Image: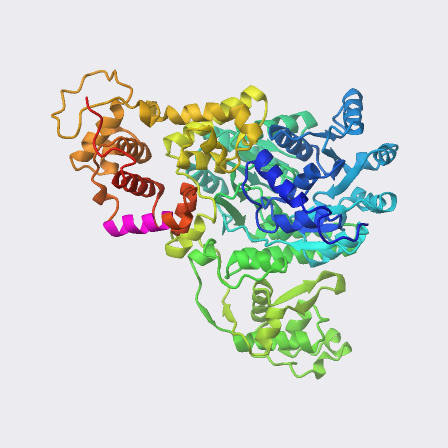
Amino acid sequence: MLAATEPRTPTQLDAARRVLKQYYGYDQFRPMQQDIIQSILAGQDTVVLMPTGGGKSVCFQVPAMVQDGVCVVVSPLIALMKDQVEALKANGISAACINSSIGQAEQSSIARACHAGLLKLLYVSPEKLLSQGFLSFLQRLQVSMFAIDEAHCISSWGHDFRPEYTQLRVLREQFPQVPIIALTATADRLTQRDIQQQLRLTEPKVFLSSFDRPNLSLSVRPGQDRVNAVVNFLKTHENEAGIVYCLSRKQCETLAGKLKEKGIRAGFYHAGMTDKARSDVQEQFLRDDLQVICATVAFGMGIDKSNVRWVVHYNLPKNIEGYYQEIGRAGRDGAPAEAVLFYSYADVAQLRDMITKDADPRLAQLNTTKLERMQQFAEAASCRRRILLAYFGEVLDKDCGNCDICRNPPVTFDGTELAQKALSAVARTREAAPLTLICDVLLGRRNQAVISRGYDQIKTFGAGANLSFLDWQSYLHQLLNDGLLYIAYEQGYALKLTDLGWQVLKGERKQNLKQFQVPQKAEKAPKGRAAKAATGTGQRLVSVTDDLFDRLRQLRKKIADEQGVPPYVVFSDTTLQEMAIERPRTRTAMLAVSGVGMKKFETYGERFIELINQHAGAPSPDDVPDLPGEDDTPAAAPKKRAAPGSTYVDSWKLHRQGLSVEQIAEQRGLSPSTVKSHLETLYEKGYQLRTEEFLSQDDFARIRDAAHELGPDFRLRDLFDHLRERYDYFQLRVALTYDKRLRGELPNQPPAE
């Protein structure tokens, strides 16, 4: 292993930034990506734990482009390899994959490309990697690094253990000088340690990103009348892609059939189908030909579809790791998405029955305990996001505002004294007792388990005898959910205190507790801070009624079908959203949009610019025809509009008559965003607007000062964020045009007739 702790040349990080902009179209790395890339460039073994959609792939793809040689990526599924290779090629990056679906002739061609140094990334399955002769083939190449994707599969403590992954330790034996990068989105404390040990990593640098996905709205609903509940849910998500996870194959097929009867483009996917049938359904979903997939957990790992807007769990998942991974398939682009879980105790009973049939008693006990934690999540009366983060060892110091509990908070009470009794019992048993035994200690029960360990002699014995077993079980669950305790599965499921737990025990921090409550059918609409949280952070969805956004999506689908790739490979939803906001009409402006790299601009850019210029049937602002000014008496409106820009003036005339944007939109049968587009364009041409309807003079001054602070090269999104979302994009454009007109950079009168 290389012992260096800094990049081997000072220019490598600069080169990495250039790669990010040129091939991916982004100006800067996401949080932690730069530090991870520096570690990899230094030749250090690296462990990356980052949530789905957090940008794990960039962490090894960018260094692979910067360094000499080929990066070998070990990936568990053919679908994952195929998607990622397609996306890399669309960005202009040389990549290929070798697996059981690739013929011998193509494999030979890929091998020749590797020997010639023409490939930067080679994706392989673990079975192929370990097959006879393949390691010898790699020995003849210059391998820059090994990237082990979905690394939680290597641990028997993880939720998706795959025996073939355990043999990957051979990489350290045969390639001792090549750094190994392990990446996963779901691993608790124990699994994290096991990954390092199984891969024989040498003093790895561990990067634990926040597991928080604030753009995901979390909710749990009662399990009654699920079919109608799903249908009603889909009515509010028209044309938005999503996944419904079901417990059985029959449920998948039945639900898909009922959705199709309602006119919804739905399909099903499960392990009982032929390989071709599964592949066809998956391809239709990736290409947006199907809106909904009803699937078992056999579907999803490695599905790189960025525009999944929601995930529904028709039944309770087996564990929190699986649940977290599955909901992570929604909102990978960072835009708002929803995760809905239907819960009933019947699901718990069915899953428990399945788990107890496992031939390995150790695994049966482990999976039963993890199921109980999943049940606690579903029944919880506290912020669901805090529960998820606490499970992965991360503490959120305030409620998220974007889950059903936060939107309908239960009554709480100061439970510090009760919490301290429970935490004291855990501490005085030397953190060696499981949850049920702690309850026995608090209740003062002198059973064999308590007496044999001497727990009847500790000070906390019987300290909670005034409450019931179910009460203490509920409170301990809350302490687990709130991150004051965690379960050490490898130590007999003993409860352990976290740093936060010790603070409460020592009286340094208060702890509120809640009574158990059944999930309610209806939620209040989010307000204030919760409403803001519900839109996520960073990226925001343009309203689905926005004409331009819809037309951009249609163009994307057309191009994707022409090229035989999924639409998100062309551009992500968030990139299209930024186009709809910024409306780039030049090469420079389009390249400034996040997600538009040089290769994608050369391939698709001009077609999107052309569509933006033609939005609402209008050319660019310079091509709007010279029409009568506001003081002229308008001629009788012709029955047929010959002038391509006359629709703009029709909106403007109604505005000058005193109608609001909403009233104009309703009268003309347009969306409000289209009316605003008409008014903005004519305002730039010198037509007068009733600007006081949109902004006060104080607003104009505040926006002007903010623009000055940002400097001359800011984008509209930068100004929107800088002003903390106080003004919408229409108001910002009006203010900036107003300022340009004051400075004489734009006309103050419409063109002469």
Q: Horizontally, is 568 left or right of 199 in the view?
A: left
Which secondary structure class fits the magenta region best? helix
Query: Could you say where residue 464 lies in the image, as x and y percent from the top left?
Result: 59, 78
Determine if the magenta segment contains residue 597: no
Boundaries of the magenta span: 697-707
Does any portion of residue 276 appear in the rendered image? yes
Query: Could you say where residue 158 lies in the image, as x and y percent from the top left?
Result: 71, 51
Image vertical order of residue 624 relative to residue 510, above or below: above
For the residue pair 71 and 573, the one nearer the viewer reads as 71
Q: Horizontally, is 117 left or right of 426 in the view?
A: right
Image quarter in which the C terminus is found: top left
For the residue pair 422 and 461, the one nearer the viewer reads as 422
Q: Which residue sits at x=42%, y=56%? A: 407
Image vertical order of residue 65 relative to residue 440, above or below: above
Does any portion of residue 318 appear in the rendered image? no
Query: Could you say where residue 193 lies in the image, as x and y percent from the top left?
Result: 74, 57
For the residue pair 365 and 125, the one nearer the viewer reads as 125
Q: Give the quarter of the image for residue 544.
A: top left
Count all numbered tags in the image, as a single digit. 0
